Image: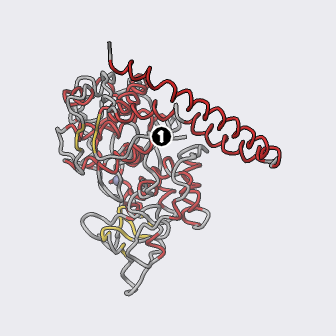
Amino acid sequence: MPSFLKSQKGLSPIIVILITIGIIAIAGGIYWWQKTAIKESTPAPTFTTPTMPTSTPHTATPITPTSTPSTSTPTPPATFQPKSKFLKDDATAQKIASVQILSYQLAKSPSKNSFGFKFISGLVQLGYIYPKSDPSALQMLQNFEKDQNLPISTVVNSKVLQKLDILLEEQESSEAQLAKTFPLYNDMASLPADYPTKNHALYIYATVFRSLPTQLANWTFDNFKIFYNRHQIADPITYYFGYCPSLDCLSRDDFTLAATLLHEYAHYLEACKQVGTKGFYEIDWNVDNSDWANLIINPKRLGSLNAVGSLSATPKDPIKRSSPVNPVLYPNNQGFLYHEGSISQYAGALLSGGAQEGKTNDIREDFAESFAAYVLEGQVFRGKAANNTIIAQKYNWLKTNVFQGKEYQTGNANYATLDFAPSDNDQGFKSIPAKVEDYSLLDPSFVKWDFQIK
Ligand SMILES: [Zn+2]
């Protein structure tokens, strides 16, 4: 028999005594408590108050255990299957999507034929602007991440890539639809795989030319074929990026592409005599009649517009400074004549071979820049016209003689807050950017173009 049972039996009288003492003590305690409870009639509130905090953590406790395991256990990275035409066949994109590559470090300036270059081309196709004030692919990535509520980083991971893939896929079919209406669609080659797609490039073309009054953009093969003699259809990189030969092509966002297309198309309209521009030039320039023969080409000849001679003239009212005979050039842009009536510095382009017979400028650039500004920076052009009679005359001439009354609600309404010549004190220089598109591109808040030209 176990020994402790024996001893328990032997101790029972002591236990009885202890129980008796206990009962007396409890009874005494109850009697004392009842007496004090009656005396202090208000302990009830002080007693209920502590129950409040004890009940609050109690309801909160279930949340803590359920949330703790989910943060302590690492969530597996999201995998996906790229669906956009742009990404689905790319080997690196597939590896990032299947998290074989957890994060792809994006270079500040990705080299061609790299996945970084392709990724940036993807962002370009969503309208993102390669920042002109701080040219960096990383800045572009971070603008995208901020826009899409993704964590800010310097890498492309599956989440970033999936967002890009979804957005590209969403727009690919509507882009293709519009691109295929462009009369030269079947004659244009595809771009290299790390560039934007042919459909996207021609979607921009179609968007730009459809924004013009129909009588300006004759929607035929012949019309655009003549225009594209200048743009060398055989070279697909050139037709997307203009004359940009290398890595700098990254800076060619779609907004710049649109501005360039409009500028070059203005030269074409003028040279093929679809638009008579003499009245435009007479607003601001001393035009010599003998120059006009150089300007016009025969559209049937399919000659290169580059072969067209310049249209040379001097400004009617040149700004002169230190020397009475020397017109003022932009301090940081010596190939251009400063003129208050210019919409951009480029509009004041000097003759490439230097002044001839006293004539300083190739005034075709004034028409081309003004034409592009009218379509793409409508608000800017009207805003400047309100403060400058020469600019107002140019705007109204274009409105009446070229655009048949059509006006555009385009461009950067905040242009006047920008400083286009930060190193100079001259207010005139500060108000005129190098190119028309800079009214938007040099605004750091302009991170994405919406492809709207209305
Ligand atoms: Zn030009």
Task: For label 1, count other residues whose C-alpha is less than 10 Å away and answer few (under 14), some (14-19) or many (20+).
Answer: few
Taking 133 as reference, is 201 above or below it?
Answer: above
Along the horizontal axis of the image, is 411 left or right of 312? right
Quadrant where the image shows the C terminus: top right
Residue identified by numbered label 1? 450
For the N terminus, the quadrant is top left
Query: Residue placed at 21% from the left, 28% from the top?
Result: 95
For this orientation, the residue located farthest to the top is 1
Residue 343 vertical position relative to residue 79 in the rendered view, above or below: below
Identify the residue at horizontal 55%, vertical 32% (top origin): 18
Query: Between residues 309 and 179, which one lies in front from this camera angle?
Result: 179
Amino acid on which the number 1 mark rests in the picture: Asp
Local SS, label 1 = loop
In which quarter of the view is residue 231 placed?
top left
Front one among 226 and 197: 197
* Visible residue check, residue 205: no
- Image point (61%, 40%), residue name: 54
Percent position of residue 61, x then y = 52, 35
Give the camera-side residue of 151 and 14. Answer: 14
Q: Is residue 302 rendered to the left or right of residue 246? A: right
User: By what rule are the colours in the image chosen?
Assistant: secondary structure
Residue 33 x/y as whole percent: 74, 42
212 sits to left or right of 330: right
Q: Position of residue 56 (x, y in %)?
A: 61, 39
